Amino acid sequence: MSADPTQVLAFETDCHIFDGCGFPAPGLHSFLFEPLWGDADSNLYFNKTMLLALLGSIIIVGFFWAAFRRPKVVPGKLQMVAETGYDFIRRGVVYETIGKKEGEKYVPLIVSLFFFIWMMNLWSIIPLAQFPVTSIIAYPLVLALIVYVLWVSLTFKRHGFVGFFKNVTGYDKSLGAVLPLAMTIEFFSNLLVRPFTHAVRLFANMFAGHTLLLLFTIASWYLLNGIGIAYAGVSFVMTIVMTAFELFIQALQAYVFVLLTCTYIQGALAEHH
């Protein structure tokens, strides 16, 4: 296997079982890519994940622009698909969590987040790309920080400083003697743990899913030699099964991310009791 940790390929194509080479297991090198432009040492570069994120953004904007640039009362196929997706997030997530009156202004943000994350996840199973952008922690982290800043600012705006303090600490005088301990736990949970878990939940699922897909894909190729061909067939079937399962997980993780976002917004807007 190549010693270069930034190789694009996850494994050597000339390595098979019984050839005297070990199994080229996926690892951190499978998530690192050589710069397409610039120098990695200077931290000023453009690589595959950045390209996929840019292309994904263009695809999403282009899709909705094409669908709604000339909206019709009787929608065409493209407009119908776009309206269905938009309406699902608006009614099934935003309205159900925040409410129609308060939630309407946040619909564009939540719809954008959902489709952006879903597209970033989908790159994992698209030929030539075959890499989920959200398996790089920086992307989920930035998205989670956007939500975090929105949540904090909304809470301050709606409740003021005292109300914000009560909101993030779960202040409830009926707790009596355990109130200080409960407030401390809630404070650290909301202000420190919440954005971390919001980002890591998406990152960890996409990281693990991509690793499993790589594992079965590499195994299918590695076992393709001699008697190992029989096992290669089993591994290939598992690759197909995992790809189908990953399709479900990709949509689910985008849904969970925006659902939690709406929950945080609802908590910021709700009156403290």
Image (cartoon, rainbow, N blue to C red):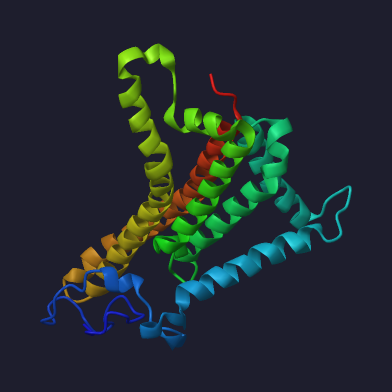
Task: Name, please, the residue furthest toward the right.
Answer: 73
Residue 3 placement, left or right of 239:
left
Q: Is residue 190 above or below residue 133?
A: above
Task: Name, please, the residue furthest toward the bottom.
Answer: 38
Q: Quadrant of residue 206?
A: bottom left
Residue 57 placement, left or right of 24:
right
Instruction: Give percent across and percent down for residue 237.
Output: 34, 59
Instruction: Give percent across and percent down for residue 122.
Output: 50, 61
| Whether residue 237 can be seen here | no
Q: Is residue 140 above or below residue 227?
A: above
| Whether residue 137 can be seen here | yes
- Tell how many labels: 0
Residue 59 placement, left or right of 252:
right
Q: Nearer the viewer, residue 164 or 242?
A: 164
Q: Nearer the viewer, residue 232 or 147?
A: 147
Q: Is residue 83 above or below residue 184?
A: below
Instruction: Give percent across and percent down for residue 86.
Output: 69, 47
- Residue at 52% of width from left, 75% of height from top? 51
- Residue at 48% of width from left, 27% of height from top? 166
- Residue at 41% of width from left, 12% of height from top? 174
Q: Quadrant of the N terminus?
A: bottom left
Instruction: Give percent across and percent down for residue 207.
Output: 35, 59
- Residue at 36% of width from left, 61% of height from top? 210
